[in-house]
Amino acid sequence: MAPDFTLDAHDSETAARAGRLQTGHGEVLTPAFMPVGTQASVKTLTPDELIAAGADILLANTYHLYLRPGVETVRGMGGLHRFMSWPRAILTDSGGFQVLSLSELRKVGARGVEFRSHLDGSRHMIAPEDAIRIQDGLGTDIAMSFDEPVELPAPAEAIRVAVDRTVDWARRGLDERRRLRDEGRGVMALFGINQGGVDAAERRRCFESLGGMPFDGFALGGLWVGEARALSLEMVERDVAMFPAERPRYLMGVGHPVDVIEAVARGVDMFDCVLPTRNARRGTVFISTGRLVVKNAAYANDPRPLDPACDCYTCRRFSRGYLRHLFTAGEILGMRLASIHAVSHMIGLARDARAAIIEGRFQAFRAAFLTRFQSGELLSPASVPVRRGSPGVTESASGFPRSGPRGSTEEMLDDVE
Ligand SMILES: [Zn+2]
């Protein structure tokens, strides 16, 4: 069953659109940011915390789960949703990118990819058909076609060969899903991945073939791998102009707030990226006014939340000073709280963009977002003045000053408890 993708609104001034993607595990509102749960876990966060952050879809990684714990284990445990206790949608990437970036001694041939596990050196062979069967075995809602990304910069010939292979593997992947469906399986959606690096002619040539195949959605692959932002965005514009309007469009591996909003303006519906949560675990988060390195000593006495404009659990309850302390002390809670903010912030950004598109004010939203993000406001540390006569004692441990709409009595009670 192909996922049902409904477009709710189009922006009149840009290519931005708001939609809803129906999956076997609920509806995904687009534009959507997908937190990354590489090994069936969004690092440090529970499913309940992800749901509270607004996530309606997660990304999991085929390469990692295939190597450990193995697809048969996941299937035996009732599939990925049950295994990780995640009730909402899951998209799995096909593993092509990880084979390229993580494994040793890989050999790419017409049949597929031969490689050694980065975990124990064991030898494996994944053909495009295997990638589809593995994703079906995991029980994903949206599978990705097995592709061959190219490490840029690459000679034109290497890009051409990778595009030919990506197209051939895309066709074989679709054939495999048809065989699975003949066996009563393969209900998952399958997205094709457009490749060609930053060579516009090769991307066009790739999509001339892919576009004729019955994929349920299309992804933009091989971008944001070191090239200039303007060039990446140009490739997005060109790809989206070729992609069918009625299918979802997914920009892989992109999660900087500015890139997300700029790609939404160019008609992209879905995003994923490890960057927000990876940075968060290292004490750096994006907030509405830029990038905040909360582990810095300058924030040691800052009573404000990470982002006064954010209403996530972390920003409702904790100060920058406390987070800074947790990072300095090596407390795991610091990573968890920063990750909660990071995920909430990115999902919230996509949701805000969606609301702006639906309400016909996306252009104004985009301009205001960019101005604010580049302003650097709120990034300079503030500190609590120390009262004379009570050295080192702040007035209220539980009620640090906060602005924002959520300063309710109920929360103060929670704080006391
Ligand atoms: Zn927050």
Image (spheres, rainbow, N blue to C red):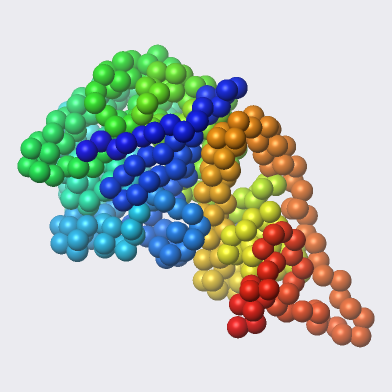
Left or right: residue 321 versus residue 230 is right
Q: Residue furthest right?
A: 388
Quarter occupied by the C terminus: bottom right
**Spot occupied by residue 399 in the image (x, y as percentages of width and height):** 73, 74
Left or right: residue 310 versus residue 87 is right
Question: Does the rendering let one see residue 102?
Answer: no
**Spot occupied by residue 318 in the image (x, y as percentages of width and height):** 65, 69
Q: Residue at horizontal 64%, vertical 32%?
A: 361
Q: Residue at horizontal 11%, vertical 40%?
A: 180
**Spot occupied by residue 293 in the image (x, y as percentages of width and height):** 66, 56
Quarter-of-image position of residue 83: bottom left
Q: Residue at horizontal 19%, vertical 55%?
A: 71
Q: Residue at horizontal 64%, vertical 55%?
A: 310
Vertically, is 348 above or below 227? Answer: below
Q: Which residue lies furthest to the left in this view?
A: 183
**Spot occupied by residue 45 in the image (x, y as percentages of width and height):** 45, 64
Vertically, is 78 above or below 160? Answer: below
Quarter occupied by the N terminus: top left
